Image (spheres, helix red, strand yellow):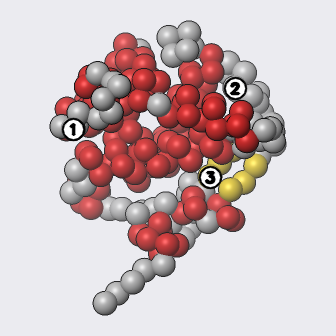
Amino acid sequence: EMRATMRECFLMVGLAVWLPSGVTFTAPSSAKGGRRGRSLLFGFGRQEARSLSDEELARLNPSTLAYVGDAAFELYMRTQHAWPPKALGMQQEKVVHAIRAETQAKIHDIFLVDAELLSEDERRLMKSGRNACKSRGPLRLPTAVYQSATGVECLIGYLYLQNATRCEEVLAFVADAIETDPRVR
């Protein structure tokens, strides 16, 4: 019987973000749109993280990519709201708003409307994630909302495992849109 530690499991799928040394706070920078002026990285590009080959990545189904994307998206949003320190309840409220399926579905719609935001391959991947979602999701939501959210998570999961730099760009856009774009609020 082989047992892996939690750290080894995260490293196997490239999720080095769990490691305490993976969180770094960078100096404030002014981003377009004024996104709180800081970038909080969470372990992308760490040497010890195992990246998947293109062949391994191609074998992952959209549901698995959405599973990884959900974790990466939530962790990104949590790190974005970790600084400056504020009441935990306020942090949690903002994170929950950001990761709700309804918010992700609105981001999905923005990605479909604004052609320059995603490449054709990224758009195709997001659509395949949306179409692969067979479950009904929470009863409080229409199926289409849940499917759109799964498509966004699939895209983020793929980018997280394939291209950390691009993933961070997409996540930064999403975080900025959640705070500033009236289509998301």
Reply above or below: 83 against 14: above
Q: Position of residue 24 (x, y in %)?
A: 72, 54
Say which amino acid is labelled 2.
Arg
Left or right for 25, reference 8 = right
C-alpha gap between disc 3 and disc 2: 17 Å
Foreground of the two, 20 or 27: 20
Q: Earlier in the sequence, mark 2 or mark 1?
A: 2
**Where on the picture, by quarter, is residue 43?**
bottom right
Sort mark 2 into few (<14), some (14-19) or many (20+) by Cα contacts within 10 Å. Answer: some
Which residue is identified by label 1? Answer: 135
Left or right for 42, reference 13 = right
**Where on the picture, by quarter, is residue 91?**
top right
Left or right for 32, reference 59 = right
Could you tell me which residue is drawn at 40 percent across and 63 percent down?
A: 13
Which residue is identified by label 3? Answer: 42
Say which amino acid is labelled 1.
Ser
**Any part of residue 103 in sight:** yes
Say which amino acid is labelled 3.
Phe
**Any part of residue 158 in sight:** no
Foreground of the two, 78 or 140: 140
